[in-house]
Image (cartoon, grey):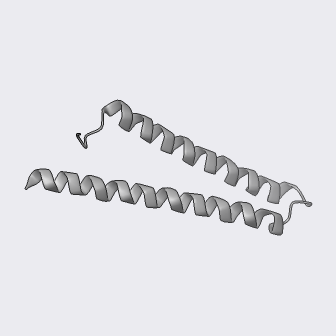
Amino acid sequence: MTLERMPKDLLIDQLSRKLYFAEMEEKLLHVTYNLASDRLYTIDDALPDLIRIIRLLDYEQEDIMEDITRLEGIVFEQNE
């Protein structure tokens, strides 16, 4: 079994990541717009959504860092 992934698989992963960030951006814009334009949508309404978005972005950042660490290990093992 090889650790190298096909370029197509890597592209699919990166496109999925981009889509995930675009979805989070859409949710963040939605919350911000509602706060700015709707007097019935309060900060108390927005906080759970904002906390969820921050948490999801944090999970994604952790996943990216795990990928970087894994790839560094592969690269440095190949250079030895």
Q: Residue furthest left?
A: 80
User: In the displayed image of the protein, which residue is found farthest to the front?
Assistant: 1
Q: How many marks?
A: 0
Q: Nearer the viewer, residue 67 or 46?
A: 67
Q: Residue at x 61, y 63 (%)?
A: 54
| Residue most extreme to the right | 40
Q: Quadrant of residue 38?
A: bottom right
Task: Tell whether 16 sits left or right of 40.
Answer: left
Please report the residue visible at 78 percent of the width from the left and 53 percent of the height from the top. 33
Instruction: Point out residue 43 in the picture as x, y percentages from the top left corner.
Output: 81, 68
The residue closer to the viewer here, 39 or 68, is 68
Left or right of 8? Residue 18 is right
User: Residue 9 at what x, y percent from top left?
Assistant: 37, 34
Give the position of the C terminus as an image quadrant: bottom left
Residue 5 sits in quarter:
top left
On screen, 78 above or below 4? Answer: below
Q: Residue furthest top?
A: 8
Q: From the viewer's perspective, is residue 46 above or below residue 79? A: below
- Direction from residue 68 to residue 33 in the image, left or right: right
Q: Which quadrant is home to the N terminus?
A: top left
16 relative to 34 in the view: left or right: left
| Residue situated in front as seen by the camera: 34 or 72 | 72
Residue 51 % position (x, y): 67, 65
Residue 52 placement (x, y as % from top left):
66, 61
